[in-house]
Image (tube, grey):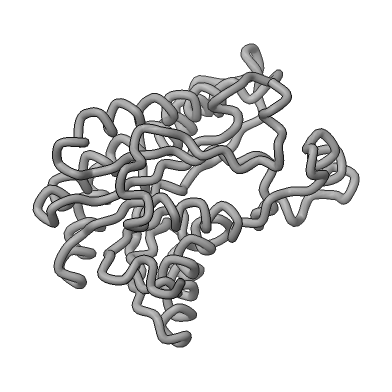
Amino acid sequence: MAGRLSGKVALITGAAAGMGAAFVRVFAAEGARVAAADIQDELGRTVADEVNRAGGEAIYVHLDTSRESDWAEAVAHTVKRFGRLTTLCNVAGIYRTEGVEAETMEGWQRLIAVDQTGVWLGMKAAVPHMKQAGGGAIVNISSVAGLSARPMAIAYHAAKAAVHLMSKVAALEYAEHNIRVNSIHPGFTMTSTASVLPEEVKKALADPVPMRRAATPEEIAYGALYLCSDEAAIVTGTELVIDGGLSARH
């Protein structure tokens, strides 16, 4: 089925590389007009340019997800260019490995600002325009680390668990406005960061996965495509786990 997002206007964060860039390409290929948002301006513009050369429609907007003023400007620019906003994908995120004692206040606050506060600010900025559009869809990227615990990465676990429940709260709050909110929980995914890891590290990460491999960014993007399409018109307040079966063991 082509054109599954025809008529949609999507703002996608973390769009300069990896998972976010995959979202931009998949959404544009399915008919959405896309605002690709990131802090990596050159890479982000490259992604948007690639979409336009391929026959899609995309713009690049600078957006530090931890800054409320950036959100206001990015959303305003998107609406000015495309006339409305129907779709938000909060993909941007950072990762830290530190555990309880090793984590620092600076590291904790930075990760929470991007991975948790940024998701809230995005919904806060987007929802008024979705109300004006008569409804919309929001997908927040959490993680399998937002569903079950493993040692270390205390701030990351905290933020992704928060995103899980924040999505449910927003889903309940805005159901009457026909705004759907869901979370996606990827497992080990071969992002641009993961792709440069030593082969032994990749193997160690893939071995516990029942399907014995990482997900591709496109496989996560296709999950979001469904949740943001009209095919999922009754789907809200839930989570989609895309992890090769990893979380089935917990």
Quarter in which the C terminus is drawn: top right
Work out whether residue 67 can be spotted: no
Snapshot quadrant of residue 245? top right
Residue appearing at x 21%, y 36% in the figure = 175
Answer left or right for 241 relative to 72: right
Q: Is residue 20 above or below residue 242?
A: below
Work out whether residue 121 can be spotted: yes
Residue appearing at x 32%, y 61% in the figure = 10
Snapshot quadrant of residue 205? top right
Nearest the viewer among 45 and 12 is 12
Residue appearing at x 34%, y 38% in the figure = 236
Residue reaching furthest to the top: 101
Residue appearing at x 26%, y 70% in the figure = 7
Q: In this view, does 169 lie above or below 242?
A: above
Answer left or right for 87 relative to 194: left
Place of residue 161 in the rendered image (x, y in percent of width and height, measured from the top left):
49, 24
Residue reaching furthest to the right: 200
Place of residue 28 in the rendered image (x, y in percent of width and height, measured from the top left):
41, 72
Nearest the viewer among 180 and 71 is 180
Answer left or right for 62 relative to 75: right
Place of residue 222 in the rendered image (x, y in percent of width and height, measured from the top left):
52, 58
Place of residue 230 in the rendered image (x, y in percent of width and height, measured from the top left):
32, 57
Nearest the viewer among 122 and 132 is 132
